[in-house]
Amino acid sequence: MTLGELADMLETSARSLVPRLENDLVEIGAVVRTTAAEYIGHEMPEWPPLAPSTIKQKERLGYTGRVSGTDPLLRTGEMRDSIKAVVADLTLAVGSTDKVAVFQELGTSRMPPRPFLGLAMSNSLEFAAERLGETAAALLTPGADFLK
């Protein structure tokens, strides 16, 4: 490859960088969103178990046994269904519009945290690294063109 060909390849890669990264972030966001939603209702090893009084209250209200024995974080499904991933200006944000999500994620003075969003993001890092690595390799490989 000549220096001129290298310069042309790098110029082409530079032009496709932002669309490729936006696409990657959308894909990563979808994985994080889906993963976070899947945690709701399941006992996660990273979370403390529900208090016996909470389990009794959930049983009395009919909020157990739909997904798991205690269905942690799950009552109506509104919080789970409110999880969204948004990409803007090469920034990925995954969160919930349900105000209860903040209390579940961070805990309160009466309730330990059960982070489902942070856990999902952490557990999606391998996918993100793989996806972004593929993009980096494609940008630096002559003739590679796989913008999805």
Image (cartoon, helix red, strand yellow):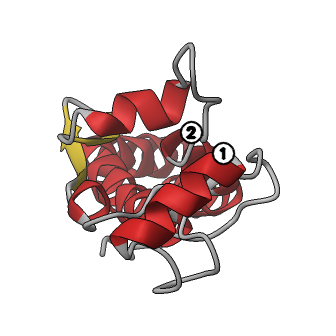
Disc 1 residue type?
Answer: Ser
In the picture, the quarter occupied by the N terminus is bottom right
The one nearer the camera, 16 or 109, is: 109
Residue 34 can be seen in this image: no
Quarter of the picture holding the C terminus: bottom left
- Within-10-Å neighbours for mark 2: few <14, some 14–19, many 20+: some
Which residue is disc 2 drawn over? 118
The answer to whether residue 7 is left or right of residue 1 is left
Q: In this view, does 1 lie to the left or right of 126?
A: left
Pick whichever, 26 or 42, lies toward us.
42
Q: Which residue lies furthest to the top in this view?
A: 109
Residue 12 in the image: state x and y as whole percent.
31, 50
Q: Position of residue 120 (x, y in %)?
A: 57, 53
Q: What's the amino acid at mark 2? A: Gly
Q: Is residue 6 left or right of residue 21?
A: right
**Residue 48 seen in the current view:** yes
- How far is disc 2 from disc 1 in space, using C-alphas? 6 Å
> Tag 2, which secondary structure?
helix
Choose top left, top right, bottom left or bottom right for residue 63.
bottom left
Q: Name the residue at 20% across, 60% down.
A: 78
Q: Mark 1 points at which residue?
A: 122
Q: At 82% across and 58% down in the image, what residue appears?
A: 45
Whether 110 is drawn above or below 57: the answer is: above
Q: x, y (%) of residue 66?
A: 46, 86
Q: Is mark 1 on a helix, strand or loop?
A: helix
Above or below residue 5? Residue 113 is above
Q: Are marks 2 and 1 in contact (CB under 8 Å)?
A: yes
Q: Nearer the viewer, mark 2 or mark 1?
A: 2
Q: How crowded is mark 1: few (under 14 residues within 10 Å), some or many (20 or more)?
A: few
Residue 86 rendering spot, x and y as whole percentages: 21, 45
